[in-house]
Image (tube, grey):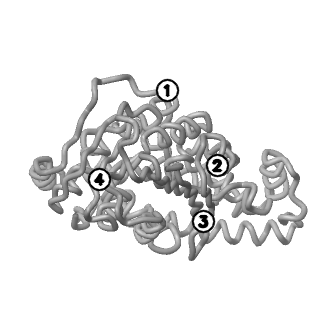
Amino acid sequence: MDTPILAQRGRASVDFQAGINKASGMLHAAMEAEMAARGITAQTMPADIDERHALVEERLSDWPAFKVRQMLGEWASKNHGVMCRQAFEEIQDEVIPQLKALDEGPTTLDYGKGEQAPSYWSRVWFHRTTGGWDASDYNGYVHGELVHKMLVAKAYPGDIFATRRLAASKAPRRDYKRILDMGASSGHYTLPLAETFPDSEIWGIDLSPRMLEHARRVANERGMAWKLIVGQAEDTGLPAGSFGLVTSFILFHEIPPRIIRAILEEAYRLLEPGGDIVMTDVPRYHDLDAMSVWRYDWLARWGGEPYWRASASMDLIGTAREIGFENIEAFTMPPAHNYYVLRAHKPA
């Protein structure tokens, strides 16, 4: 899907937001340099994460740039979705007919039976998105095409879409008959799965109808026949033993540990004997030094990630072993090593 041509006001707003994000990153680097100058290092930080946050607040309370960094982070987190939605509204009369045309095609979307979404999802505005993922009819487009491609992709190091292709390539086989993407959202990972496994039947499940509606457009535009379902990854209702590969990308840090375990149990149930999982998410805190843990945790607090710390502290290898998986591997992906891959096998 081509990057949209925004109207003047919308383009200026999104560019301004991107500039704020860049300035925030530069200030954060300066902040960590100032922390080091004031004796705050990985070696001197307290063992308790909350005490680390308190120490930074205390030591940098008189440094003006620290308050500016906090202010910019707060502003950017609260306004990125709002500004992109307003930019979309300026061009919606032109864009919506194009989107509606892509609602028809080979990909199907099952809205389920209208079950109430679980509270861990419905009560949280993830990434501080005003109103949540389904706040407007075209939020899938706003986040899939504007937020991610015009803001997130510019703020993170490297190519975030290449990272998704790399994660898809980590599956140990290429001959899966059927693949399930858990937490498919707007299709940013589902698409590289479909491209990596062109002969496989691609399924996706997510709690957000609006995000899956955009995933359907992404697939239909390319003539791909995905099967998308609105539902819970931890309780899909799909037949046992029906997938060769169950996978996810950046899902676990959005949910509490008890749901992560339930998802891994459901993945095990859904896999055919000899099937595989490949679950990619944020790094494990136990693999990081104290400064790196503080950095991730600090950014998660500003970014609206209420489950990040608990999920990043979870022992995924041990959990997978308890469930019954074998040949369990875990590793980070280059170049930045800021994505953690859990790969495991269901016994034949």
The three-letter amino acid code for the residue at tag 4 is: Ile
Q: CA distance from mark 1 to mark 2?
A: 23 Å
Q: Closer to the camera, 8 or 242?
A: 242
In primary-sequence order, the first of circles 2 and 4 is: 4
Q: How many C-alpha atoms fall within 10 Å of the one at disc 2: few (<14), some, or many (≥20)? A: many
The three-letter amino acid code for the residue at tag 2 is: Leu
- Give the numbered dot on residue 338: 3
In primary-sequence order, the first of circles 2 and 3 is: 2
- Give the numbered dot on residue 316: 2
- Give the numbered dot on residue 341: none
Residue 335 lies, with reference to residue 89, above or below; the image says: below
Residue denoted by label 1: 119
- Give the numbered dot on residue 202: 4
Residue 161 appears in which quarter of the rendering?
bottom left
In primary-sequence order, the first of circles 1 and 4 is: 1
Left or right, 138 with reference to 125: left
The three-letter amino acid code for the residue at tag 3 is: Asn
